[in-house]
Amino acid sequence: MIFLPVFIIGLTVALSVPLGRYMARVLDRDGPRNAVERWLDTGGQTWKQYVYAMLVSNVVMFVFGFVVLATQPWHPALFNPDNKGMLSPTTIFNTATSFLTNTNLQHYSGEVHLTYGSQVFGIMYKQFLTPAVGLAALLAVIRGLRGDKHLGNYNLDLWRGLIYIAVPLSVIVGVILIAGGTPMTFKGNVEAQTVQVGAMGTEAVDGKDVPKPQTIARGPVAAIVAIKQLGTNGGGFFGPNSAHPLENPTAWTNVIECVCIILIPMACIVMFGAMIRNMRHAGAIFGVSLVMLAVFAAWGVYHDAAKPNPGLAGGPAVLDAKGKPHAVTTLDADGKPEQKPLPDHATRERVALPVTQDTGNLEGKELRFGPGAGPTWAACTTVTSNGSVNCMHDSLNPLAGLTPLTGMWLNCAFGGVGVGLINMLIYLVIAVFLAGLMVGRTPEYLGKKVEAKEMKLAALALLAHPILILAPVGLFAAAGWLDPSTNNPGAHGFSEGVYEFTSASANNGSGFEGLGDTYGFNDKDKNPSAPAPFAPHWDIACGLVMLFGRFIPIIAPIAFAASLAGKKPTPFTSGTLRTDTVTFGCVLLGTILLVGALMFLPVAALGPMAEHFGPLPFGR
Amino acid sequence: MTTATIQPPHLNPEQLKAARRLSRRQGLFAPDLLKSALKRAFVMLRPDILWKNPVMFTVEVGTVLSIVYTLVKAIDPSSTLATLGYLVALDAWLFLTVLFANFAEALAEARGKAQADALRKTRQETPAFRLPSHVDPATALAADVPAEGTVSTALQEGDLVVVEAGQFIPGDGEIVAGVASIDESAITGESAPVVREAGGDRSGVTGGTRVLSDRVVVKLTAAAGKSFLDRMIALVEGAARQSTPNEIALSLVLSTFTLIFLVVTATLWPMARYTEQYMAGYLGAAGLKSLGTDIPTLVALLVCLIPTTIGALLAAIGIAGMDRALRANLIAKSGKAVEVAGDIDTLLLDKTGTITLGNRKATEFRPVGSFAAAELGRLAALASAADETPEGKSIVDLYRKQRGSDFNAVPPAGSKFVAFTAQTRMSGVDLPDGRSIRKGAVDAVLKHLKHNGGTVPPLVQEQVNAVAAAGATPLLVCEGNTLAGIVVLEDILKPGIRERFERLRKMGIRTVMVTGDNPLTAKAIAEQAGVDDYIAEATPEAKLAYIRKEQHGGRLVAMMGDGTNDAPALAQADLGVAMNSGTQAAKEAGNMVDLDSDPTKLIECVEIGKQLLMTRGALTTFSIANDVAKYFAIVPALFAATLPWLKALDFMNLASPVSAIMSAVIFNAIIIPLLIPVALKGVTYRPVGADALLRRNLLVWGLGGVIAPFIGIKLIDLALAALGLA
């Protein structure tokens, strides 16, 4: 239980150092090196030119992805062997946005709703390109912080990120996965005749009830899974994501996939250190991120794999400090409050079901990997903006559910490819500002003074995330869209809603699931189950949140870095704040917790904490 | 080691200054100040004044909203779960929060004003005698030039006034004719009169000072009400106070936090209602209400979360910084100047007066050739008999000390003294018996000898170099065309100066000694004093070039100067402190004026600047760290009526939901006046290096900021419970 997370994290740290140095070497080359690069290179760009080029390429990507998804019924048979129809327009918008923003939030089920054409040409190319966009943004920011005259060339950065990082790494990982048993084919579904009766039920053949054949979906899985894990994408080929046996066949593919989640984000920090020639500073950031990841993983494993499932295990009566049942307060028309105790069935002692709880909460876990693998993966996939899953986050014990939520609320411990470190830099600037003042100097970062203009840009990036999460949750709660969409009543249902917007704003893409956000095919009759009542609302709201959540925290920091780049460097003296010490690491961690985490305490209290402390049964 | 560190003989200027400042210091909460500050605090409630402070303006708007909802409750009792008594108490404390913030700023202003008033007393209307504008200043001293009697407030820039013994100088200006001794005690507190004269670098006079002797013509450089002091008074009073760059950046951060917490609390309302709905549905209990949907309670949460502590004290900290500068007799031309002082990387310090005690002293006679030491001493003393410079006197003193006091080297009657001129760079005496004795700079005397056909004994140059290399200044003495020997003049280091530089080094500041000495001497003194670098044979151009070089490397440079030729360097430096005794040009070029004309003041300047920034940082950290406890007090209370089990988050185990919220609000309000002394006095600066300083402040203000409100809120809650208000 402890070995797996330690092994996974340790292995990734070891791999990230050489990878990071390699990235700094190949991505930070001066000028074009070959014919293709000469053709792509348009010269050094200012921050405005760089951002413009980035936005243009993203618009093109969006339009292309949208068109591919919207023309699904007309895809050639090779790419649509199962003859899938048109998706609902809001789902198309949501999906096009989701993959454009490296989020991979899926309001559909891949194997049910998408053709192979959509998987490969609507989605997979974005899974390669969007991490490269994130890397490019990071390269621009680092060059700014380093004080370069130009922020580099966007075309060149995108190309190199794709050719030197995304493609070769996913080829390696893809081959390993194929060796592990992941399918890689363009052939359609297969039907298997089973001996036992499965979930499909039986049919009468020659007057005898025989089990219905099982339809097994397959496709170019290995290619998609490799880049989905490496590029902090997370959008799986199959609905159950890496819990699906064809997406994640064995225990060791599970380790490899989990390592792939955090590998490039970790290497980004090493690359940062190499590029600014200050490994100690990068080390401080790496340390802080590692501490956060370790704490989240440990918290998740402890509260899930070491604690019983509260629905199955018994529990004492839920009483207040005076030993009485909790009471709620109602107000009558005259304004007189009345205490109303909770009914006995809600608060009395619960008797355990005769199920052993020694292995922790097994609900929603993939038992092939063991109970600890789920929360470990959950921590890795949410500190980074990956969002792939190998267990049902909805089924995590309430407090263990705080692990993925907090990981996404902070969204800076390693974080998404490129963008994670950019998010961290925002906290870093706030920390530098406060700590810099406390040593009696105008705050400086990497030898450049941080003044009003820079703080304005940092504030913009900092503000976006909480607003994009809290405001839509408030809106959906107020408008009455949240309650009918949730699969569970009460606090857990609330968590489902919070999780969805958190995941969208953090560009994570994992779901707490259980939320009714799938519309499916536009033709209602083609859907196996009726569309969720407010699915279009979720599609549009999450789509917008993902867009803002992606681009505001990229553009503002690029402008920030460019502003610092133009400043005269100040020499380092003993009066200067050191950003490479344990003390500074503590400042950074404290800032992240005070500034980043505290604003989500009320929703954490209303969601996971209320669920944990409260009585179990909730009815509508 | 030829230089010695000695204790100054009699009065210690440091102690004297400290004593003077102590007498000026007023109590933090002097009753008359409190009264005027309280009055002003109410005036500042006006939204058009308060909106400049976004944090406190938010609190004010919230308070109004809370009062409105209190009225709604009075009309419709079923509108909210909160009781009327609780709402009224909440309104009152929210109002007090704004008032406390205003009070902090008003008190800082009042203290500054009181300080400024003391200075302003020197600027009261005084009679003045204006000369007609056509008068040539050079002839104006003649008694018969008619002067028009007027008052100081009617004077314009450029006016010429005549000031005689016993009269007050009517405004800041420069002496254009005459020399006078002036009592500047009104501004500097220094009782010894100073001499000011036309021309040169000691021509500046300040309005309100009194001429003790003689008669001078002063050309006014600032019209009444526009002098440095007036500007500074306006700055301290807050009237002309503009936010400094750093203050703007911090305000931005505070506004961001305010906005974030506004989103947090505003979205909490629908979420709390959602909770009410699902619990009501579950229990079948209509009318289920919690404090989470009570607007005044949400306002209380907002006010507790936004950084009110620093928001309330930010202006006060800035004003107090100016005030501290003023107390140190430093007149800053802007708040920015004080702030920049904290960022200084390089200090240019004049050797004389800063590093060494004003003057050099003769310490040894080194004869050459056939001369004996005693004979050389006698000759040197004779040559210096009429030399009134400290160096000259010290030569006579040394001779007397070596030979006994009865050996008086008084030249016989009829001797002719030759005064020092910049051309000959020698002085001496021609005795009646025809002997001529000269003493002077090495090259000047050698040239004199050569000119008179004398010979220079071998090895003199080596001896001279040896003296210079040890940090002393060699003077040569000759009789006729024979070289008698070398007089060794030594610099005396100020006591404790080495430790002071050590302190500066720990602050991360490079010290550079500026001296007119030759490189050899300069190097030796620099080593003894422990400065990081030196500029030898300094000219104004050399200083300017050095400053530019430092700035090119990204360093911020501070320097002090008094002369007109210092003006370019003062203007170029990031922090230029002009001495009050200096010329008008120097004062115009610098961004601070030191009334004490004390060269060591730069060090104090830097500390004041650092303290200002540190206080801001420390209180901001404290303010944000406080939120942890407030969250854990208020969040469970908000949902006590719907999700009572969230009480498990109430680590402080507060008496009741209402008491929890009130305790947090009361703590949030009273922490403002409690921290006023810190804001006004500043967080103590210790020159221990950035890392140690950060650790200390993190422990005190960061960790302390997390822990203090847990204790404070619990204590207030206990008090409320004891009073039966919980």
Image (cartoon, coloured by chain):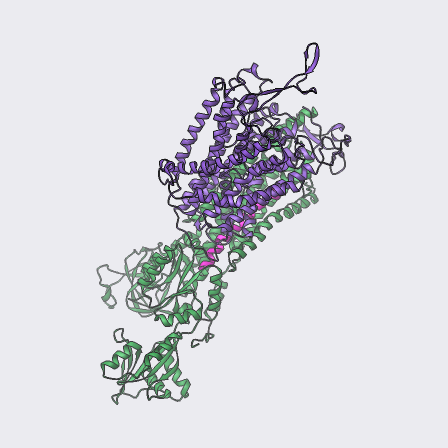
* As drawn, B160 above or below A605: below
Q: Residue at x 45, y 27 (%)?
A: A62
**Residue farthest along the front direction in this orientation:** A179
Quadrant position of the N terminus of chain A in the picture = top right
Chain A colour?
A: purple
Q: Colour of chain B?
A: green
Based on the picture, tell me whether residue B622 belongs to the magenta stretch. Answer: yes
Q: Position of residue B409 (x, y in %)?
A: 35, 86
Q: Quadrant of residue B180?
A: bottom left
Asked if residue B119 lies in the magenta stretch, the reply is no
Span highlighted in magenta in the image: B605-631
Task: Tell me residue B176's x, y (percent).
Answer: 27, 64
Lateral position of residue B631 relative to residue B655, left or right: left
Quarter of the figure with residue A294? top right
- Numbered disc total: 0
Residue at 66% in and 42% down:
A2
Q: Is residue A301 left or right of residue B469?
A: right
